[in-house]
Image (tube, rainbow, N blue to C red):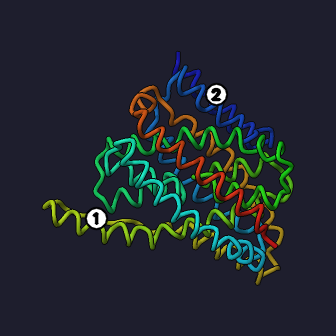
Amino acid sequence: MKNIIFYVFLAAALLATVMGWGDACILLIAGIFVALTVGNPVSSLTSHGAKYLLQASVVLMGFKYDIHSMLAVGSQGVFLSIFSIALVLICGTLFSRWLKVRYEVGALVSCGTSICGGSAIAAIGGVMKSDNKDMAVSLGTIFLLNAVALLIFPVMGHSLHMSEQIFGYWSGIAIQDTSSVAGAAQSYGGATLAYAIPVKLARALWIIPLAMCVGWFHRRRSEALGAEAGSFSIPWFIFLFIIASAVKTWIPAGEFLYTHGADLGVKALVFTLYLIGLGMSYHALKSVGWRALVLGVLLWIVLGISSLIWLTVSPPV
């Protein structure tokens, strides 16, 4: 019976998304509710589906933006990205020692918070040969914070009377996962997505140099301990997003297709958040230790406040 209810909710979420009735925040909450009450009989399928659907939706949304504007927005956030990534990594090292968080978990949560959540954790976890428990704790911590961010960031933005541009930059910097950034920006409305997505994806490119640095450090540490170092995968979908934006800019004849493709990408992203919500479970909640969660919250506060101060003192043009 529970399986039937699960599929009914899944069909309802898909229908709501296709018809344009679905709100990102509501569908995320609905997915979590279904997962915790009814259960998810196909958790592996929805997990993989969410991963690839997110990447596809981001690529399709590339057809929504002019590449010159997109690169301009991304480039304006470069110095803020460098500053905030360095600050979070330094604070992550200090806080991890203070809270006595294990080295692997501290590194994964810090890297996930500093760049782009689950994608960064997956990349850095591959470099560090992290075991499943460390990955589960780190991903669970980031998942909870992303769910909270999707709900409270738009409220905070409106209460502080942020412009769409400032909120787009802030969410792109201070929220970890691309899905939650896009969801919060969509909820905020207007042209917020046009600022948030380029900033987030430009920031996500830092996975590559960070993974190389972590790989070098971890290889030295592994050699000293007699352990084996791993490898990481490049987030190719970011480059496909740029290509889609370039096609829209330089081949204007396909504007009709670009418009519908971008709209499909936005709807796919909303449904992705429902699938992400379905990934929640009591086991995942139990796996998140209080130390890792406190570390994630502290780093999140540092990132949110420091980036907001930066944007207030030196707003983007």
Q: Residue furthest top?
A: 1
Q: Mark 1 points at which residue?
A: 218
Which of the image's four quarters has the C terminus? Answer: bottom right
Residue 212 percent location from the top left of the image: 38, 72
Q: In which quarter of the image is residue 60?
A: bottom right
Q: Is residue 23 left or right of residue 4?
A: right
Q: In which quarter of the image is residue 21?
A: top right
91 vs 133: above or below: below
What residue do we see at 59% from left, 44% from top? 146
The spot of residue 249 in percent (x, y) is 77, 79
Mark number, residue 278: none
First reached walking from the N terminus: tag 2 or tag 1: 2
Asked whether, in this view, residue 303 is left or right of residue 27, the answer is left
**Residue underneath mark 2:** 9
- In terms of image quadrants, where is residue 173? bottom right
Residue type beneath disc 1: His
In the image, 28 versus 260, the foreground residue is: 28
| Residue name at image x 30 percent, y 68 percent | 217
Percent position of residue 22, x then y:
76, 39
Residue 209 lies, in percent from the top left, at 45, 73
Amino acid type, mark 2: Phe
User: How far apart are labels 2 and 1 at the CA level?
Assistant: 44 Å
Which numbered disc, 2 or 1, marks the residue closer to the eye? 1
Q: In this view, does 58 lie above or below 100?
A: below
Residue at position x 83%, y 50% from top?
A: 189
Q: Work out which residue is located at the far left of the displayed protein and give it.
A: 226
